[in-house]
């Protein structure tokens, strides 16, 4: 069972509350702004219409999931089945893992379709897949120059004041300072990051950006962006008026990979904040 904001609409990028503890988010079950949602991911015991009981622990996982779909009637925002997808290649797993990290989730749980259920057992057909951060030996200091909304409804809408923009930012656009560049084009975009910080730190970052944050319009982009306007996955929802009004974030990543999404020509794979706000820089 998980506690979710009462405005929650389902698993995915919009379910930002899943990436933090309800207590640290300022929500409280008795306040009316939190609902308890039961997320079902398996079925171990079953009683049929005739009263016959079945122990399903030695039944293959795929058969259990098929039965679960037949006997459970989900109810939105009360009783729901954890979404899953069948995969058979490492490439499919890689793509799903990247999507999970993009959605500010920790990773994936991979289950062998033929696996049986064992209490208090590890690595018996069930595996947790998370990014490894040993690829880059050093962390990077990058400048926060823009942001992405955590709520896709806000992203689709065009309205919003500066306060609305800041309060809905959940991920951040990071850039590196150009070498020997003038103030009009002082940074080059590198990546976006949405993990590695708590709700309290997120509030501090929002407050820091709030006075200088504005809705991003690629047709009227600020001069510091140069010729970059953002790709399908990298275009921000909001940007600051000047890199001088951003702040430094220390990040780590699994590796640096080529991309056309950012002006740098490369980006960080699985980036996460080590120190969300470097006050000393």
Image (cartoon, rainbow, N blue to C red):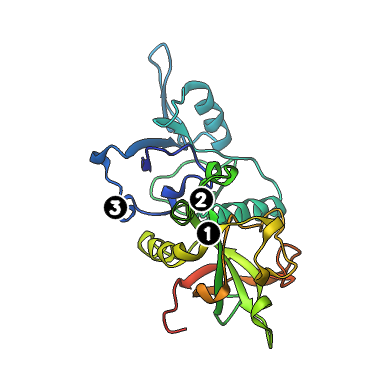
| Crowd tier of the residue under label 3, counting other residues whose Cα lies within 10 Å: few below 14, some 14–19, many 20 or above | few
266 in relation to 111, above or below: below
Indicate which label's residue lies in the foreground, 3 or 2: 2
> Which type of secondary structure does the marked residue at label 3 adopt?
helix
172 displayed left or right of 33: right
| Crowd tier of the residue under label 1, counting other residues whose Cα lies within 10 Å: few below 14, some 14–19, many 20 or above | many
Q: Based on the displayed image, in which of its 4 quarters is residue 20 positioned?
A: bottom left
Disc 1 marks which residue?
A: 171
Q: Nearer the viewer, residue 32 or 70?
A: 32
Disc 3 marks which residue?
A: 23
Q: Residue at x 25, y 40 (%)?
A: 31
Q: Are marks 1 and 2 in contact (CB under 8 Å)?
A: yes
| Residue 23 appears in the picture as rendered | yes
Give the mark nearest the N terminus, 1 or 2. 2
Q: Residue at x 47, y 83 (%)?
A: 281
232 displayed left or right of 52: right
Residue 240: image location, x then y, percent: 55, 66
Give the mark nearest the N terminus, 3 or 1. 3
Q: CA distance from mark 3 to mark 1?
A: 21 Å
Indicate which label's residue lies in the foreground, 3 or 1: 1
**Residue 205's mark?**
none
Quick one: which residue is furthest to the left in this view?
30
Q: CA distance from mark 3 to mark 2?
A: 19 Å
| Residue 250 appears in the picture as rendered | no
Disc 2 marks which residue?
A: 150
Q: Nearer the viewer, residue 36 or 189?
A: 189
């Amino acid at each position: 069972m998980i506690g979710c904001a009462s405005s929650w609409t389902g698993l995915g990028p919009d379910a930002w509350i899943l990436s933090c503890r309800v207590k640290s988010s300022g929500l409280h079950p008795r306040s009316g702004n939190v609902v308890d949602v039961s997320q079902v991911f398996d079925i171990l015991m079953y009683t049929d219409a005739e009263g016959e009981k079945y122990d399903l622990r030695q039944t293959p996982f795929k058969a259990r999931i098929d039965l679960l779909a037949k006997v459970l009637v989900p109810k939105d925002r009360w009783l729901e089945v954890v979404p899953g997808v069948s995969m058979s290649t490492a490439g499919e797993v890689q793509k799903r893992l990247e999507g999970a990290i993009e959605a500010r989730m920790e990773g994936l749980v991979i289950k062998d379709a033929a696996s049986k259920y064992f209490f208090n057992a590890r690595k018996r057909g069930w595996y947790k897949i998370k990014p490894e951060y040993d690829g880059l030996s050093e962390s990077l200091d990058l400048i926060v120059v823009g942001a992405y909304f955590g709520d896709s409804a806000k992203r689709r809408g065009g309205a919003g004041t500066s306060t609305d923009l800041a309060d809905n930012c959940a991920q951040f656009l990071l850039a590196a300072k150009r070498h020997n560049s003038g103030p009009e084009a002082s940074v080059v975009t590198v990546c976006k990051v949405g993990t590695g910080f708590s709700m309290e730190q997120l509030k501090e970052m929002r407050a820091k950006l709030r006075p200088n944050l504005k809705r991003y319009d690629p047709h009227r982009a600020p001069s510091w962006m140069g010729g970059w306007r953002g790709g399908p996955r990298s275009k921000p929802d909001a940007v600051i008026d000047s890199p001088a009004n951003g702040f430094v974030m220390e990040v780590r990543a699994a590796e640096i990979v080529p991309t056309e999404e950012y002006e740098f020509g490369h980006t960080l794979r699985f980036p996460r904040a080590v120190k969300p706000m470097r006050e000393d820089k």
